Image: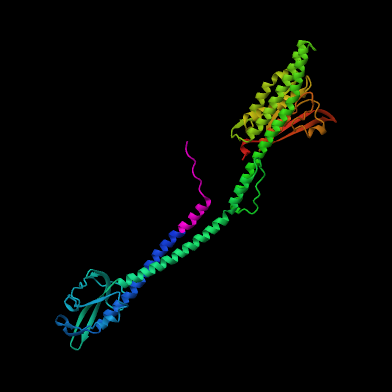
Amino acid sequence: MTPPRRAISLRRYLLLGILLPVGLFVVVNAVSLYRQTLDAVNVAYDRTLLASAKSIGELLDVKGFDEDAQLRVTVPYAALEAFEADNQSRMFYRVSTQKGALVSGFGDLPFWQGRLPERNTYAALVDFYDDSFQGEAVRVAVLLQPVAGQNGRAMAVIQVAETLELRRTLTRKILIDTLWRQAVLVAVIALVAVVVVQRATRPVRRLSSELQARPEGDLTPISAADAPRELLPLVDATNQVMTRLAHLLDNQKRFVRDTSHQLRTPLAVLKTQVQSALRGDVEPRQALLEIYDTVERATVLANQMLSLAKVEQLRQQPDESVNDFDEVVRSIALELSPLIADKDIDFEIATMSAPVRSHDWMLRELTRNLLHNAIKHSPVGGALAVQVVTDANSVALTIADSGPGIPAELRARLFQPFSPGNARSGSGLGLAICHEIVRALGGTITLENRETHGHIDGLDATVRLPLAENIQ
């Protein structure tokens, strides 16, 4: 057996849906801010390196011109000390000719082999690059400084290198400050999200508690006037389900109640008849005929009550099949033809194709009950007409008998269960079954007396059902 899947917590889903994107955005934003700040730090300290190189360039002197020029410089340490921000980083310099010949400074500082950038933000021939010196990472500024005077002219290459301790310290500080701020931001967002989600899911928890606290069998609609708009469809759907369940339970209780009430009488009569036969109060044949009649009436009653219950069952199980009402009516007419012939009824039938979306049993039970009633109430040798016609939207079945009709005071309650027109001739369930079937199919049923000069010629039972093409 497959274990049930663990239900997803709505609160957890909302919190993850809010906090994960926010957390991802904060991480991306922190990385981006860190890189931007690091670039800004490099730009600021690169300016310091350029200023150092320029200060050295101001100390240069030259003797001779071009190939014969000799550069001279004396750089006191104080010239670089002014540009050192603190004692964490150290600065080194090298002054060379364009061919790399050392003029002054640290001879083991690698000579620049690069090229000047095509675009430069500084008003100088300068390049910046990362290198290593004496086993440490350094940032180097290279300045091509023209040197000219009365005694000569030449181009000097000035390199100023700085260790990265200060830059790294400042970068770490910026990173930590950034992360602290982002962490506080995430914490605030998480707190707000938790509070908001808790408040947003409170109606769901309250509804759950109310439903769990309900006594067994309580199917009254849920009252959720303060529920958020997104929850209302769920509340409405739940109320609809509970209404259907309440309707089913009511029908079940009514069926049990009616069954126990209606079957009690024929069973009591049957018991009395059997006792009378055993005592010899009546002739055996007559006793058997009476018992047969009672059993027959009880059987009809039981079958009709089961049919009424089946209508409600099929109502809850919609059938998408389409049946031709014309074929059903003709089939039932053929089935009941012995009863028609037995009363020598002048029978007439006229039908046309009428597709209806319905259970086949419903259409047959509806037609059988109406036609059987019409045959039963038609006099011997009377007339009986069945007609099926359609229009643009519906089909109409009309069964016109030649019976005595129905009094106006009785017509209003004939569709109620156990309200027969003649208490001696039926159980009063036939028309109730027809009424429930028509309701389930979304149609209407009417019973109208047919009169001529104030005289009742018969009864017209008319059923209207929507055609299959018009059912949504």
**Left or right of residue 12: residue 234:** right
**Left or right of residue 262: residue 41:** left
Q: Quadrant of residue 216?
A: top right
Q: Is residue 10 magenta?
A: yes
Q: Does residue 445 lie above or below 8 as drawn?
A: above
**Left or right of residue 251: residue 56:** left
Q: Tell me where residue 9 appears, x and y as whole percent.
A: 51, 50
Query: Which residues lie in the magenta part?
Result: 1-21
| Way the structure is coloured | rainbow
Name of the residue lying farthest toward the right: 454
Q: How many marks?
A: 0
Q: Does residue 12 lie above or below 344 as drawn?
A: below
Q: Tell me where residue 29 appears, x and y as whole percent.
A: 42, 64
Can residue 397 be spotted in the picture? no
In the image, 399 versus 199, the foreground residue is 199
Instruction: Residue at 58%, 54% (x, y): give it.
Output: 202
Can residue 182 be spotted in the picture? yes
Name of the residue lying farthest toward the left: 68
In the image, 339 versus 64, the foreground residue is 64
Q: Tell me where residue 85 appears, x and y as whole percent.
A: 32, 78
Q: Does residue 203 lie above or below 447 as drawn?
A: below
Q: Quadrant of residue 358?
A: top right
Q: Is residue 2 magenta?
A: yes
**Left or right of residue 199: residue 79:** left
